[in-house]
Each structure stands twice: as C-alpha cells, then as structure tokens.
Image (spheres, grey):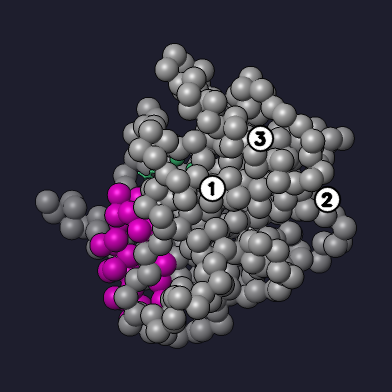
C-alpha cells in the first residue's frame, strides 16, 4: 500500500483543476452556439470548452504546484486558434477562462489571449517512460457534450511510465446508478467526481463538493447478471462485436451506451460490470482517453486490459500501442470475458476472410 502522503499535493491540485474545468464546460454546455464548434483536421469536433478546459487545467496545475517541473500531454493545441478568423473564438475562450478562474478566490489574475494560447500549447509533451507527465483530455466525449449527454474532464499523472493518480469529472453523471432503468431521473443529484491514487483506492464525490466516499467495482461472478457499457457512437466502437461477446457470455440486459470515460467511473462504482471498446480498424487509442479511467477502475478493484489480455502500457508516448480493443471488468469475470472475446474475434476474422 502506498503511503497516503505520496502524490497527495498532486491529487489535490488535480481535483481542483478538473473541478474548475468542469465549471467552465457546464457554462458552455448551457449556452452552446453553433459557432462554438469547429472541426479539427481529423474531422472530430472541438469546442471553445475543449480549449478553455485545457487552458484552465494547465494554469491551475502550474499555480498549485509551482515548485514542480511541468510536463503535460493533452489532446488539444492552439494551432487553429492562431489562424486568421479565429480572433473572436480566442476572445471568447479567454473570457471564459478568466471568469472561471475568478470563481476561485485564491486566484487574482487576468490572463491575456497570448497567455491562454500558451497555456493550451503547454500540452504538447510527448510523455514517455521517465519522469512525471500529466495526461489530459479536456473534454472526453465531445460528441456527448454537444448532444447534452455524458462527457468527462479526464486528468491523470504518469510517473516513470505508470499511472499514479487520476481524476474524472463527469458533470452530467447522476449520483444514482445509470444502469437502473427504474430510477426516477427527476430525483437525481447530478455531477460526480472520481479520484484515485495508487495503492489508496478510488473515491467518488459530488462535483459541487460533498465528502468523498470509497467506491468498488461490482462483485458479480455470473456473467448472465452483468450489464455492459459501450460507446454511444457506433463509429467509436463496434457494437456488433460486443453484442456477439455478450451473447456468448449469456448477458441478459441490453447494453448501456454512454459517451466518454464516464463509463469507467460508472463501472468503478458497480453500475455495470463490463465495458468493451472495439474501435474500427486503423484507429489509434490515445493515452488521455484511458489514463484517468484506468486508475479509477483499477483502484476500485477492477481490471483493464487489451483484447489479448495484456496490461495497458502508458509509457510509449501519446498513443497506446495495443491489440485490437479494450476490456474492463472485475477480477472474477475477466477470464470468462477474455475467452468470449477471443472466440468472437476468431469468428469475425473467419467471416471476413470468407467474404
Ligand atoms: N473514430 C473514433 N473511434 C474511436 N474513438 C474516437 C473516434 N473519434 C474520436 N474518438 C474518441 O473516443 C472517445 C469517446 O469515445 P466514447 O464516448 O465513444 O467512449 C473520445 O476520446 C473521442 O475523442 P474526444 O475526446 O475528442 O471526444
Ligand atoms: Mg477530440
Ligand atoms: Mg477523448
Ligand atoms: Mg477530448
């Protein structure tokens, strides 16, 4: 068990950074305008909130941990914001960042547009196997964010290539289980923050600041009782493949489809027992899409592997180098799940080779 003081300052800074970034995202989601959405070169959407969230997290981490060397591996960069025609967007982001930071009475600063560009661009680190690197997805699940559904601010810390802490802020995730179809959504308290530190378990609290409580993954052993999480977007994960896997396992419940690493958070507290992710051929997984979720689930007693059962390796730079897909479940179910996945993958490759 790790000493409870190890990484404690970093965890407190990460919780503060992700909570403030979540506040900015909530402001934008409430007033989303079509001009707030741009398309990146890879055709994925990016909003003023993605940029604003990245700037806030980067600035807060630097202010809270001034004596530490700073390396950040983050999804966005300010390239498009420096182009002609982006001035109004940059102004809006700068205003949002300043307004968000001013809600914390300990910060008395006013940032220029250039400061905000620099804060966003401080996320260009390559990560790797040595030293400490923060890993950030400023909005994970941008498509969910734009739909008004689930998204997460996902922040992790790598030390010598290993994830040592992670925070997932999920502003639209109810405190009550999302897998229970009978819940009364009108009674829900909304907005959860998950935090985990190596050797110390996983906590969940309300985003607006309730006391944290320890959470644990589901203890079910019979796959028939499991419920499954997968991407809302069929373009992000092959739903037909997870359906053939759950059929093999005898899973009864229909899949619960939600966006972002909120799936890792929901699984860490036992809302469901399996999360499957099978991106389409050619997609490369990034470390910021899994670092925080990985430790939130592992410290809650769960397991995360690739489709071949290998551990995820966060030490290889900005990308995860892995076999086919990502599997998340509890320790009891993992061997059964791995078998079902291997069978389903064999059948799939057989059927494609016959085409
Ligand atoms: N074509 C794609 N296949 C798989 N994942 C994708 C694809 N495009 C974007 N993503 C990323 O998948 C994650 C969300 O997946 P899901 O919500 O389905 O779990 C996000 O990190 C999203 O990036 P982003 O952070 O830009 O939203
Ligand atoms: Mg994106
Ligand atoms: Mg993402
Ligand atoms: Mg993102």
Residue 266 image point, x, y percent: 52, 68
Task: Point out the frontmost of discs 2 and 1.
Answer: 1
Asked if residue 234 lies in the magenta stretch, the reply is yes
Q: What is the spatial separation of the Cα atoms under label 2 and label 1, in whole angstroms?
A: 28 Å
Viewer-nearest residue: 309 or 238: 238
| Residue shown at 18% from the left, 51% from the top | 353
Q: Which residues are magenta?
A: 226-250
Label 1 CB, ligand 4: below 8 Å?
no
Residue 161 visible in the displayed image: no
Lateral position of residue 342 relative to residue 321, left or right: left
| Residue shown at 56% from the left, 72% from the top | 189
Residue 69 image point, x, y percent: 80, 32
- Residue wearing tag 3: 98
Q: What is the spatial separation of the Cα atoms under label 2 and label 3, in whole angstroms?
A: 24 Å
- Residue wearing tag 1: 27
* Secondary structure of residue under mark 2: helix
For label 2, the crowd category at 10 Å Cα-Cα, with few meaning under 14, some 14 to 19 and many 20 or more, is few
Asked if residue 163 lies in the magenta stretch, the reply is no
Task: Point out the frontmost of discs 2 and 3.
Answer: 3
For label 1, the crowd category at 10 Å Cα-Cα, with few meaning under 14, some 14 to 19 and many 20 or more, is few
In the displayed structure, would residue 86 be above or below residue 107?
A: above
Residue 22 image point, x, y percent: 59, 50
- Residue wearing tag 2: 9
């Amino acid at each position: 068990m790790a000493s409870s003081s190890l990484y404690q300052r970093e965890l407190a800074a990460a919780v503060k950074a992700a909570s403030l970034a979540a506040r900015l995202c909530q402001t934008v989601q409430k007033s989303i305008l079509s001009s707030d959405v741009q398309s990146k070169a890879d055709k994925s959407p990016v909003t003023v909130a993605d940029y604003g969230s990245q700037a806030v997290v980067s600035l807060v981490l630097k202010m809270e941990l001034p004596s530490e060397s700073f390396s950040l591996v983050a999804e966005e960069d300010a390239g498009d914001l420096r182009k002609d025609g982006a001035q109004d967007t940059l102004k809006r982001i700068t205003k949002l960042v300043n307004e968000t930071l001013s809600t914390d009475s300990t910060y008395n600063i006013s940032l220029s547009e250039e400061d905000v560009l620099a804060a966003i661009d401080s996320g260009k680190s390559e990560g790797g196997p040595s030293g400490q690197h923060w890993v950030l997805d400023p909005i994970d699940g941008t498509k969910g964010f734009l739909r008004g559904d689930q998204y997460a601010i996902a922040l992790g810390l790598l030390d010598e290539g290993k994830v040592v802490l992670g925070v997932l802020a999920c502003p639209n995730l109810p405190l009550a289980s999302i897998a229970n179809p009978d819940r009364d959504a009108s009674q829900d308290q909304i907005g959860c923050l998950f935090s985990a530190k190596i050797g110390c378990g996983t906590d969940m609290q309300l985003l607006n600041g309730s006391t944290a409580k320890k959470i644990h993954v589901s203890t079910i052993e019979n796959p028939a009782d499991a419920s499954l999480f997968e991407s809302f977007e069929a373009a992000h994960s092959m739903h037909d493949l997870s359906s053939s896997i759950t059929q093999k396992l005898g899973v009864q419940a229909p899949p619960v489809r939600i966006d972002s690493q909120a799936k890792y958070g929901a699984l860490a507290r036992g809302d469901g027992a399996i999360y499957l992710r099978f991106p389409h051929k050619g997609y490369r997984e990034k470390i910021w899409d899994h670092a925080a979720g990985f430790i939130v689930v592992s410290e809650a007693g769960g397991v995360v592997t690739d489709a071949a059962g290998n551990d995820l390796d966060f030490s290889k730079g900005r990308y995860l180098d892995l076999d086919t897909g990502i599997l998340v479940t509890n320790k009891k179910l993992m061997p059964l799940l791995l078998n079902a996945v291997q069978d389903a993958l064999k059948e799939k490759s057989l059927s494609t080779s016959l085409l």
